[in-house]
Image (spheres, grey):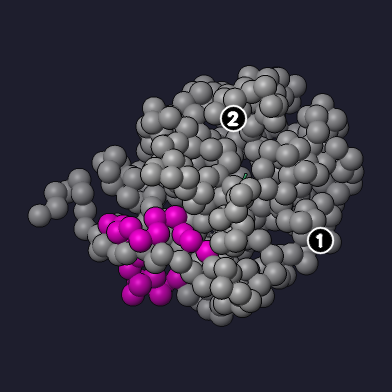
Amino acid sequence: MASNSSPEKITIRQPDDWHVHLRDGFVLDTVVPMTARVFRRAIVMPNLSPPITSVDNAISYRQRILASLPSGLSFTPLMTVYLQDNLSREVLLRGFSEGVFTAAKLYPVNATTNSAQGVSDIRKIDSLLETMENIGMPLLIHGEVIDSSVDIFDREAVFIDRHLQPLLNRYPNLRVVLEHITTEHAVQFVESNLSTIAATITPHHLHINRNAMFDGGFRSDFYCLPVAKRERHRLALRRAATSGKPCFFLGTDSAPHLRAFKESSCGCAGIFNSPYALESYAEVFDQEGALDRLEAFASEFGPEFYGLPLNSRFLTLVRTPQIVPSKFKLDKGLDSCDYLVPFHAGESLRWSLDLNLASNLSI
Ligand code: DOR
Ligand code: ZN
């Protein structure tokens, strides 16, 4: 018998995903419906090849995303612009004032997938940051230094001390999201700062520590950036996500890569979690005895930070176990390696979306 503190079902306001990679081309047809099944809005990352650096490119990318949406689902992609040393202020001003860009993303050069054209030195984009501070446009940060002398497991902490703190000092009113945090240091930094800074937390960083990458062999399915850290960091992230503090909210960082690019001598970073992201978060909140805080983390703190309205619909999760498929074939894939392996592949998850009630989500 379940006690009151561990209910059999929970109904929450429909969530949003404040950090997702939807990619482009034929992959969209497979991944967009997975995100839109649950999330009403999503902040769409701009690290395509080539990246989204103009208003017109963002508009046409948004159209391609919407064209991949199954009929009957309501979903709003919130577009972002990819910051570059020489991006013009006019792109930010026009894109933000026309409601095309919700935010701008800062990738340090070579920090991760398709970041080679990112920012080489944060001081080179000072005028862009000043503009963003003035117009109230949020800055989303991949917070890692790319310095071969800094151990990969220390790159987030060093970024915070070396770049983020000085940036916040220079632009005290700039709204900043430190994306996909992975360390206790980041948790403490975000919660001890002003209300201008928040952080997203992924499902995978709540479930795995760095051992997962090396469990019986090299497991590229658990390789993402920033890489998962030691167990004490995972526990700090769990405390942060379930703390009820508005500075921590949901961002899956779901990052699909075709199988051939994961199983490679130089495999891509990224964990594809969108098919079961909400169920994965629910498992963590349940294990932490904090299911009553899932709604705020998933559906309230994000919109509050971005100054957007809360969603008006609700969905229900039921305590019904389900097995996560080992792979998803791509609808328009061309060869046998055109498939995606989801996070939790082959595992049983304790929570499921109530499909009857989920139909409330259709138009
Ligand atoms: O693991 C990651 N994958 N981290 C990122 O920052 C980018 C992402 C991707 O685009 O594949
Ligand atoms: Zn990402």
For the record, the magenta segment spans 340-361
Q: Secondary structure at mark 2?
A: helix
Q: Is residue 12 left or right of residue 182?
A: left
Q: Give the quarter of the figure containing the N terminus.
A: bottom left
- Rendered location of residue 77, percent (x, y): 64, 61
Q: Is residue 353 above or below residue 196?
A: below
Q: Secondary structure at mark 1?
A: helix
- Residue at the outermost left position: 1
User: Is residue 343 found inside the magenta-colored segment of the image?
Assistant: yes
> Which residue carries the number 2 mark?
152
Tag 1: amino acid: Asn
Residue 171 visible within the image: yes
> Which residue carries the number 1 mark?
57
- Rendered location of residue 329, percent (x, y): 52, 72
- Rendered location of residue 167, percent (x, y): 72, 24
The structure residue drawn at horizontal position 21% and vertical position 58%, both measured from the top left corner, is 8
Residue 302 visible within the image: no
User: Is residue 112 found inside the magenta-colored segment of the image?
Assistant: no
Q: Quadrant of residue 62?
A: bottom right
